Image (cartoon, helix red, strand yellow):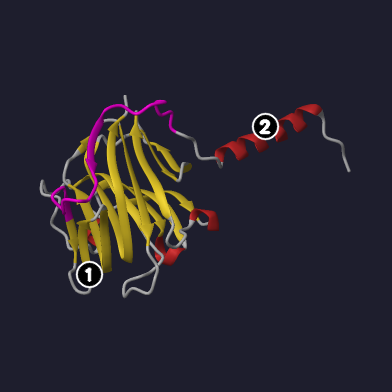
Amino acid sequence: MKALNGGVVAGLLLAAVTASAATETPRCELPARTGKLLYADDFTHGLANWVAEFRPERSAVTARAGKLAIDVAGGATVWFKAALSGDYVVRYRRKVVVGGGRNDRLSDLNQFWMAQDPANSDLYTRDGTFEQYDGLRLYYAGIGGNGNTTTRLRRYDGQGQRVLLSDLGEARHLLRANHEYQVEVAVYRGCTQVTLDGALLFAYRDPQPLRSGQFGFRTTQSRQEISDFKVYRLD
């Protein structure tokens, strides 16, 4: 076997390091501390802060006893009414319940954020069917989608293109039944990231960052419980 000279070896090592670094998800440089608490919902006063889009057959969305309960046979989006802008972090706890219920399915711990409708000032015009959201401009994280086989980050461009930014298929990035996750969705200085139980799942630095819009919980045929919803400013 022919020996490689020092320059070739160095080049190969640099290429290997670069390739390894390219596969790692960069973490956004978030502030060490959160700023002002902007919003909170303990889900003891109904759905006053939310708009639920879903078909009612064999489905319900309720807020009581400290939990937002989504129990749906088809697609559903539950929008937070207050528009969010600038730099912030959304924190909440969320569980996909699997216990013999009619809609129980381990799938789709999903969310939209920075959502706007370029064609309509009224965002709330849909019945929860997933394809109806294709024309929005937003970020979307689908965790354990497609029957708990995919975990993906997308950016919708407002013109029907749902650009895939990250696709994680390993088992460690999929859902566990009846596990209450601590979820954080942050936007800060042109970067957005999602963490699950404190572990970084997605991070994306957007060359044309979305700066304002609605946050919404999203799912398809599942029973889920959400609690301890808070939004903080990031300064």
Q: Which mark is residue 59?
A: 1
Q: State the CA–CA distance, disc 1 to disc 2.
A: 55 Å
**Is 168 left or right of 157, judged from the image as shown?**
right
Q: Which mark is residue 14?
A: 2
Sort mark 2 into few (<14), some (14-19) or many (20+) by Cα contacts within 10 Å.
few
Sort mark 1 into few (<14), some (14-19) or many (20+) by Cα contacts within 10 Å.
some
Of the residues under marks 1 and 2, which one precedes in the sequence?
2
Amino acid under disc 2: Leu
Q: Is residue 72 visible?
A: yes
**Is 117 left or right of 208, judged from the image as shown?**
left
Percent across and percent down for residue 36 are: 26, 28
Look at the image and give the residue range highlighted in magenta: 28-51
**Which quadrant, please, contains the N terminus?**
top right
**Which quadrant, please, contains the C terminus?**
top left
Q: Is residue 130 visible?
A: no
Residue at 51% over, 57% down: 169
Is residue 26 magenta-colored? no
**Is 95 left or right of 229, judged from the image as shown?**
right
Percent across and percent down for residue 43 are: 22, 50
